[in-house]
Image (cartoon, rainbow, N blue to C red):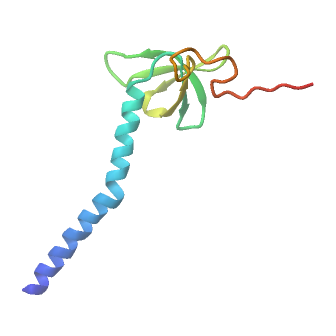
Amino acid sequence: MAAMWSVIFYTGLAVAAFYFILLQPVLKEKKEQRKAVAQLKIGDEVITTGGLIGEVKDVVVPAEGPTEIILELAPGVRVRAVTEAISRRLSTLETTDTEGKPAPEGQAGEVTHSGA
């Protein structure tokens, strides 16, 4: 009889450990990702789960179906993506410095090339 309770106890302990060690961090990360996608606005630069980087040009909320985001990958190249395809937000194009003023050109986290 005591062996049966021991098996039940260790099984419950294993399930709890699985939840707290493996499942909870994944669920928390997904929740944060959904929150970040919900806060997207036009002009944000995002990366998709497929590795494409683009600028949000429009957010389309149809009556039925998933919310779509129109991304501009290059000048004149626009694609539709569902919100689940957005991995994370890289930046907003209108960045500001610590005093709330727009950042000077070339200091908004972008790589500039100068040379001969």
Residue 91, relative to residue 23: is it above or below? above
Q: Residue furthest left?
A: 1
- Tell how many labels: 0
Relative height, residue 64 to residue 30 (above, below): above
Q: Position of residue 51 (x, y in %)?
A: 59, 37
Left or right side of 52 for 16: left
Residue 16 shown left or right of residue 40 in the figure: left
Q: Quadrant of the N terminus?
A: bottom left
- Residue for point 54% across, 33% down: 48
Task: Indicate the quadrant where residue 59 lies.
Answer: top left
Q: Position of residue 13 (x, y in %)?
A: 22, 70
Residue 41's x, y, as percent? 45, 18
- Identify the residue at horizontal 30%, vertical 63% (top origin): 18
Q: For this rendering, which residue is in front, 28 or 11?
A: 28
- Residue 43 in the image, given as x and y percentages of width and height: 53, 17
**Furthest-right residue in this view:** 116
User: Which image quadrant for residue 19?
Assistant: bottom left
Nearest the viewer among 108 and 74 is 108
The residue that appears at 80% across and 26% down in the rendered structure is 113
The quarter of the image holding the C terminus is: top right
Residue 40 appears in which quarter of the rendering?
top left
Say whether residue 11 is left or right of residue 30.
left
Q: Is residue 12 left or right of residue 39?
A: left
Above or below: residue 59 compared with residue 14: above
